[in-house]
Image (cartoon, rainbow, N blue to C red):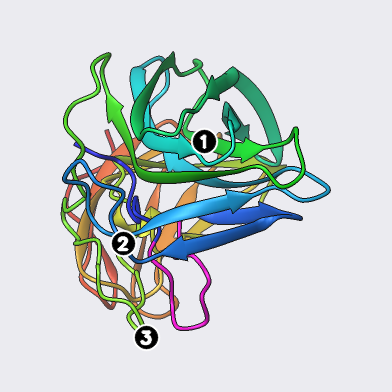
Amino acid sequence: MNLITNSTFQVNSTGALFTPAVKYGSGTLTVVSASLGLGLPANYITIVQATDKCGVYFDIPVQPNRQYVFSFYAKGLIGFVGWYVISDINGTALTTITSGFKTLGKQLQRFEIPFTTLATTNTVRIDLYEAITTGYSANITAVQLEEGTIANKYEINVSGVSERLAKGTVDLTGGIIQLVASHDYSAAAVDWTLSTTERKAQIISVTNANGAVNAIFNIDTPNFYLIDNQSGQALTCKNSTGGSIVVASTKRAIVYNNGTAIVRITADA
């Protein structure tokens, strides 16, 4: 299953890439509404480097100590050398898991990059960019991240939420379906307000608090959660309004967010 949504670089009405694709650098990144061939879906990006590196990255929730393979289709317009970096994200710090470059040709080809996440990895940043020669460019499409060691046939992520192929004013709000949403309170007790993506997880795991803490879900689509409280403190799970439940430190419980309140399904265990 492809873990990346917006894997063909859809844009909104202002031309900005939908999450999780993020453009950066001083060059240009253009979305082209056409297929590069090989039966791949329409839409690809053209990266043209300027005075600094230019590229696109994806932040994707994963599991620690797991094998994954990242793949993408690309071709170079002028002998492009494309660099990649796959990093563990820990707060604002990035730790490189693997990196290198691929020399692209004029013919479209698929590239596969296997890697194993670190023991602490919950999210990886996959970075594709050009940083060598001003004016060089490449076409990239059909990015895919899968658990395992074999890159399967490319597929659009349609697990739970569809990757919306319509453009214009349609917003890609589905985001990434992830199993675990983790939060480190960093030896503090500041409220954690879960993002739309985090609220779609099935397991909510917290660590490292110095006082009683809150995980705020806000009113959202009803969902069941396994709460894993390893924070060292009492954890209150709540929406912005409505009832809440408290999970004791080192305990786990199953709860239900009914769209208004967080209600307990099981006792702490």
- Please say if 187 is above or below 15: above
The residue positioned 30% from the left and 41% from the top of the image is 3
Q: Nearer the viewer, residue 234 or 141?
A: 141
Residue 68 pos. (x, y %): 34, 21
| Residue where numbered disc 3 is placed | 169
Kindly identify the amino acid type of the residue bearing the numbered disc 1: Ile
In the rendered view, does 126 fall on the left or right side of 130?
Answer: left
Residue 118 visible in the snapshot: yes
Residue located at (80% from left, 45% from top):
52
The local crowd at label 2, few if under 14, some if 14 to 19, many if 20 or more residues have their Cα within 10 Å, is few
Q: Could you tell which of marks 1 and 2 lies nearer the N-terminus?
A: 2
Determine whether label 3 and label 1 are within 8 Å by CB: no
* Mark in front: 2 vs 3: 2
- Can you say whether 136 is above or below 93 in the image? below
Q: Which residue is mark 1?
A: 126
| In magenta segment, residue 14 | yes
| The C terminus: image quadrant | top left
Residue at the disc numbered 2: 34
> Callout 3: helix, strand or loop?
loop
Q: Is residue 32 magenta?
A: no
Which amino acid is tagged 2?
Answer: Ala
Q: Residue at x 56, y 55 (%)?
A: 22
Highlighted range, magenta: 10-20
Residue 160 placement: quadrant? bottom left
Q: Please state which amino acid type lies under the numbered disc 3.
A: Thr
Q: Image quadrant of residue 198?
A: bottom left
Residue 164 x %, y %: 25, 68
Question: Who comes first in sequence, dot 3 or dot 1?
Answer: 1
Lower sequence index among marks 2 and 3: 2
Q: Position of residue 131 (x, y in %)?
A: 73, 36
Marks 1 and 2, how far apart at CA: 24 Å
Give the secondary structure at mark 2. Answer: loop
